[in-house]
Amino acid sequence: MIKRKIHYIDAAVQNRLLIALVLLEVLLISAGMIVLYLDMKEVVDENLFRIHFAATESLSALLFREAMQALAVLVIVNVAALGLAEWLWSRYLDSILRPLSGLLARTGDLDFSLDETFGQRHAVLELAVAWREAERERCKGVHAEISRLDENADYSSTNTLEQARAALENLMALLPVHNSGSRNRSD
């Protein structure tokens, strides 16, 4: 059994998204800290000389409210950034999977006509196109070997029988290799 190496990541896109998200976080935290500092400074300045006055709201409640507002803005912007990243990622995957699905559907229908070029350059699409080219050539070989066989030939003749045997051997060589265990199961 052949084990395939499956890659679930696309480093080029994911690195760009990760760098963008980290930069966004740094900018958000910096902006949040500046806004929080300015708000806190204003709250402290307003309440600095109110020691002897009865405050309508305590200083700690004011500071807590300002901190929660800054935190709420950070959460909203982060959720929006994650939504944008998910939208960009799904568009990117769709730009790969849509042409790949078309290639696979055409292969399933045994349509080995020439493949169109895709706007998206990706290793998966290049591998699929290369595989289809190999399958196209294999199918041409199968067709050529089948056309060498004559249904009306006299197979009692040794020469005709040898030609048919050679064509069948070439045909078997062109067919994909199947696991012999899966063919011989009688249980």
Image (tube, rainbow, N blue to C red):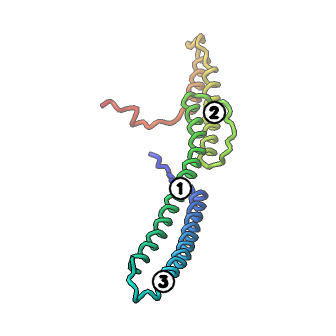
Q: Amino acid at mark 3?
A: Val
- The residue carrying mark 1 is 9
Kind of element beneath mark 1: loop
Q: Please name which of the two marks, 2 or 3, marks the residue nearer to the observer.
A: 3
- The residue carrying mark 2 is 136
Name which quarter of the figure residue 95 lies in: top right
Question: Which residue lies at the image location 54% right of the left edge and 31% below the top edge?
Answer: 108
Q: Quick check: 25 above or below 147?
A: below
Q: Amino acid at mark 2?
A: Arg
- The residue carrying mark 3 is 44
Foreground pick, 62 / 8: 62
Question: Which residue lies at the image location 56% right of the left edge and 64% below the top edge?
Answer: 21
**Which tag, 2 or 3, sits closer to the chain's start?**
3
Q: Quick check: 53 above or below 148?
A: below
**Which tag, 2 or 1, sits closer to the chain's start?**
1
Foreground pick, 78 / 132: 78
Kind of element beneath mark 2: helix
Q: Separation of disc 2 and disc 3 at Cα?
A: 77 Å
